Image (cartoon, grey):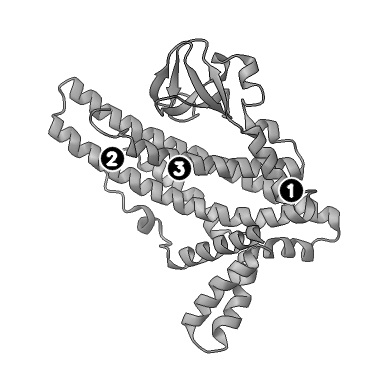
Amino acid sequence: MKSTSFRAAAALTASLMLAGCVTTQAGRIGMDDGRDACRAQLVALDSTGNFFGEDILRGAAVGALGGALIGGLASGRWEGALIGAAVGAAAGGATGYFGAVQRQARDQAAVTAQIFNDLQRENAELDRTQVAFDQLLDCRYRAAENIRQGVRMGRISRDGAAAQLAEIRGRLTNDIALARTINGRIGTRGAEFETAMDNVLPGGSNAVKNAVAERGRPVTATVRRAVPVQLTPQRGSAEVGRIAANESVTVRPGRDGLVQVETASGLRGFAPADAFPASAVRGVGSQQASLGQQDVRGLAATNIARREGFNDSVGNAERLVQAGGFELAS
């Protein structure tokens, strides 16, 4: 019951958000003023939202239509129709996708195949969104570091640098807001997939979530050598700090040969998995790869892991700003 209520609330929130959101790129991210060094990365992130916002799974549309008819059209008021559509999406969003699949499929095998294909596509788009956000965050951090380097070399005054860093912080704040909007749409679609999991997988979505949580359980490990900590898992990402040899850190799943780390001082980022004892990172190295067997359960698990990973990335970006990652003294 609690899970169903959460899904309904998520669908309702997303419906209201979509009803009031700006649908043009210029409205979402502003016009290109020629001063944003990370404009290309920002456009790339914004474009990934098209899939989650404009091509939402059929459940919300099915529920919204029924809700609109019930809530507004009978009364002749368009305001009521909009409210009814939002409520209908809440009711239909959690069950409409699976219901639509059932109506179209010939048998249970066809239902499973459809969900499999949809999860594959969803996971590919989640990867694209994650990479786009990683690259945008990396670009912002490098721009800030270039300004700090300019101050150290005497090329930029401290007052001038402070103004430029404030502008970058403002842009990043807007980037994070955009990512949060995309994340909300991802969550709405995730609720639809979880309803499908509840209907086709033994133990339902909770069993899959438990497996993901168990696989992603953090461990404490001691690094064998001094290593840099990267901002993102992208190859060549900006270095945000270092871990000293024999320092103990918290390790969580990463990807591409990296693990997520957090030091006692609160530094977060990615470090090479091979810098830690194999026994310490066994089962940690890449949650997405280890959960990604090619069946519906495996794809469902990687879908949940990817959604959680993107949400964590946005939260980490917020913490980086709050911790002074874009201040002059950093």
Badge 3 element: helix
Q: Say few, some or many: other residues with alpha carbon within 10 Å of mark 3 (under 14 / 14 to 19 / 20 or more).
A: many
Q: CA distance from mark 2 to mark 1?
A: 41 Å
Q: Are marks 2 and 1 in contact (CB under 8 Å)?
A: no
> Mark number for residue 317?
none
Amino acid type at image mark 1: Phe
Quick one: label 2 or label 3, which is nearer the N terminus? 2
Q: CA distance from mark 1 to mark 3?
A: 27 Å
Quick one: label 1 or label 3, which is nearer the N terminus? 1
Residue labelled with disc 2: 168
Residue labelled with disc 1: 116
Mark 1 or 3: in front is 3
Q: Say few, some or many: other residues with alpha carbon within 10 Å of mark 2 (under 14 / 14 to 19 / 20 or more).
A: many
Q: Position of residue 136 (x, y in %)?
A: 41, 38
Q: Are marks 2 and 3 in contact (CB under 8 Å)?
A: no
Residue labelled with disc 3: 314
Q: Say few, some or many: other residues with alpha carbon within 10 Å of mark 1 (under 14 / 14 to 19 / 20 or more).
A: some
Q: CA distance from mark 2 to mark 3?
A: 16 Å
- Quadrant where the image shows the N terminus: bottom right
Tell me the residue at 41%/18% (across/down): 242
Is 221 situated left or right of 120 in this image? left
Amino acid type at image mark 3: Val
- Quadrant where the image shows the C terminus: top left
Tell me the residue at 69%/31% (across/down): 290
Q: Is residue 99 above or below residue 240?
A: below
Q: Position of residue 173 (x, y in %)?
A: 34, 46
Tell me the residue at 61%/40% (across/down): 305
Q: Position of residue 177 (x, y in %)?
A: 39, 51
Badge 2 element: helix
Amino acid type at image mark 2: Ile
